[in-house]
Amino acid sequence: MTVVEGLQRALAVEHEVIYGYGVVGAHLVGPAPSVTPPLSRSQAARRLAQHLVLRDRIAALLAVEAPDADAGIGRLRAALPRH
């Protein structure tokens, strides 16, 4: 695996994690003792913010390593439903 391929894979994972926090976060209200481990909406928001920063850092590294490389945005947009 090349550095660019590794960065692309890491970026794809971050996109998935960010999407997942959006799905899970929609179901959290305050402290959530029924979730194992318990996760409050504020904790989820902090973790989401950390992943957003990480995503941006990975995208910046990818832009430096391979300015013409696909950062995964096209694949992400293609996977989203169109209305």
Image (cartoon, rainbow, N blue to C red):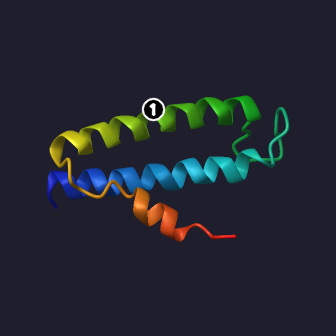
Give the residue drawn at x 16%, y 61%.
1
Give the residue drawn at x 59%, y 53%.
19
82 sits left or right of 67 in the view = right
- The image position of residue 7, as x and y in percent, is 27, 50
Would you place residue 5 above or below residue 26 in this image?
Answer: below
- The image position of residue 49, as x and y in percent, is 56, 32
Give the residue drawn at x 63%, y 70%.
81
Which quadrant holds the C terminus? bottom right
The amino acid at mark 1 is Val
**Which residue was labeled with disc 1?**
53
36 sits left or right of 21 in the view = right
Would you place residue 12 above or below residue 45 in this image?
Answer: below
For the residue pair 67 and 30, the one nearer the viewer reads as: 67
Q: How dense is the environment of label 1, judged by Cα within 10 Å: few (below 14), some, or many (20 and up)?
A: few
- The image position of residue 79, as x and y in percent, is 53, 69
Q: Quadrant of residue 70?
A: bottom left
Give the residue drawn at x 40%, y 37%.
56
- The image position of residue 28, as x and y in percent, is 80, 43
- Tag 1 secondary structure: helix
